[in-house]
Amino acid sequence: MNQLAVTPTRRRFISGRLYATPAALEELRAVNVSVGDLLSRHLRGDWGDLSAEDRVQNDLALQIGLRVLSCYALPGDGSVWIITEWDRSITTVLLPADH
């Protein structure tokens, strides 16, 4: 029997205050990708383009209160990160080069 990966339809954690770097917003606009859609995926636990090990780390981070990182591929060669801090007070959308 094949198992399908199921992404929760409900938010798994809170975002806190939302921030985005100007470069990330510019890149998302340029490739016509919604920051809201990516944020929704992040908060549901759809970690995007992470390794299996990093996905497990994020799931553990939700349980014990560590920082959570998602990475989403963009059209072309780009990607965007979304990071929620350990205390869930701040979530930031940024390009890897912004870190």
Image (cartoon, helix red, strand yellow):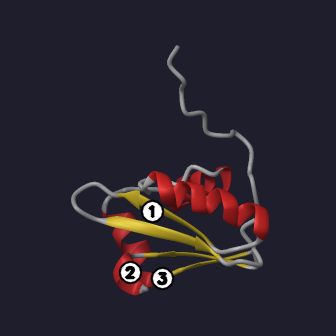
Q: Position of residue 18 (x, y in %)?
A: 66, 75
Can the viewer see residue 48 in this picture? no
Say which amino acid is labelled 1.
Cys
Badge 2 local density, few (<14 within 10 Å), some, or many (20+)? some
Residue farthest toward the top in the current orientation of the protein: 1
Say which amino acid is labelled 2.
Ala
Residue farthest toward the left in the current orientation of the protein: 76
Residue shown at the point (45%, 62%) measured from the top left: 71
The label shown at residue 71 is: 1
- Residue receiving disc 3: 21
Q: Is 9 situated above or below 36?
A: above
Q: Quadrant of residue 66?
A: bottom right
Residue shown at the point (22%, 62%) measured from the top left: 77
Compared across the picture, whether 10 is left or right of 31 comes to right
Badge 3 local density, few (<14 within 10 Å), some, or many (20+)? few
Earlier along the polypeptide chain: callout 3 or callout 1?
3
Q: Position of residue 51 (x, y in %)?
A: 43, 55
Compared across the picture, whether 6 is left or right of 21 comes to right
The foreground one among 91 and 30 is 91
Say which amino acid is labelled 3.
Thr
- Residue receiving disc 2: 23
Q: Secondary structure at mark 3?
A: loop
Badge 1 local density, few (<14 within 10 Å), some, or many (20+)? many
Q: Position of residue 24 (x, y in %)?
A: 41, 75
Q: Is 7 situated above or below 79?
A: above
Earlier along the polypeptide chain: callout 1 or callout 2?
2
- Labels 1 & 2 near each other (Cβ < 8 A): no
Residue shown at the point (66%, 56%) measured from the top left: 59
Compared across the picture, whether 47 is left or right of 60 comes to left
Q: Position of residue 8 (x, y in %)?
A: 68, 40
- Labels 2 & 3 near each other (Cβ < 8 A): yes
Q: Secondary structure at mark 1?
A: strand
